[in-house]
Image (cartoon, helix red, strand yellow):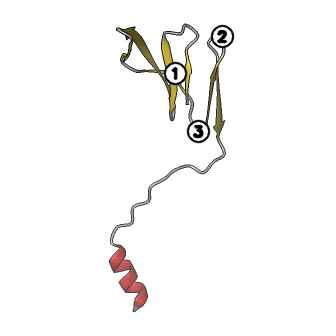
Amino acid sequence: MAAWSPSGHELLYLRAPDILAVPFTIEGGRFRPGKERVWSRVDGNYQDVLQIGPDGRALVVVDRKATKRELRVIVNWQQEIAKKLK
């Protein structure tokens, strides 16, 4: 999702957990992006909704009850299985 900033000189987009702002210029009819920066941060699972009001306030839909991502590492799993199969 992307939206224009209220000033019209930046594009805002979601890359969880951040809302990023990218300044840009138009040179010779070409779009030239600048360096992105973190505009705001909201923890949670974004639902791909980003709206920016004329006063600069942002509306982002976040599901805070969604399952958190986690990574589980199992070491020595072959030995554990071998013990259980005996």
| C-alpha distance separating marks 3 and 2 | 25 Å
Image-based side of 67 in relation to 75, left or right? right
Query: Counting other residues with Cα less than 10 Å from the Cα at mark 1, is it few (<14), some (14-19), or many (20 or more)?
Result: many
Question: Which percent across, then down, holds residue 17?
Answer: 51, 34
On screen, residue 60 versus residue 34, left or right, reads right
Report the residue marked by disc 2.
54
**Closer to the eye: label 1 or 3:** 1
User: Which one is nearer the viewer's eye here, 9 or 41?
Assistant: 9
Q: Disc 3 on helix, strand or loop? A: loop
Where is 81 relative to 52, above or below? below
Q: Amino acid at mark 2?
A: Pro
Quarter of the image where one finds residue 45: top right
Identify the image quadrant of the N terminus: top right
Q: Amino acid at mark 3?
A: Gly
Tell me which residue sits at (33%, 72%) in the image.
76
| Residue identified by numbered label 1 | 12
**Mark 2 surroundings: few (<14), some (14-19) or many (≥20) residues within 10 A:** few
Above/below status of 3 relative to 24: below
User: Residue 32: x and y, percent?
Assistant: 36, 15
Q: Give the residue type that dot 1 points to.
A: Leu
Which label lies toward us, 3 or 2? 2
Residue 51 disc label: none
Q: Which residue is mark 3?
A: 44
The mark that comes first in sequence, 1 or 3, is 1
In the current view of this chain or complex, which residue is farthest to the bottom?
A: 86
**Front in this rendered view, residue 38 or 22:** 22
Quadrant of residue 48 within the rendered picture? top right
The quadrant of the image that shows the C terminus is bottom left
Q: Is residue 5 above or below residue 65?
A: above
Residue 18 in percent (x, y) is at: 50, 29
Mark 1 and mark 3: span between their CA atoms? Answer: 18 Å
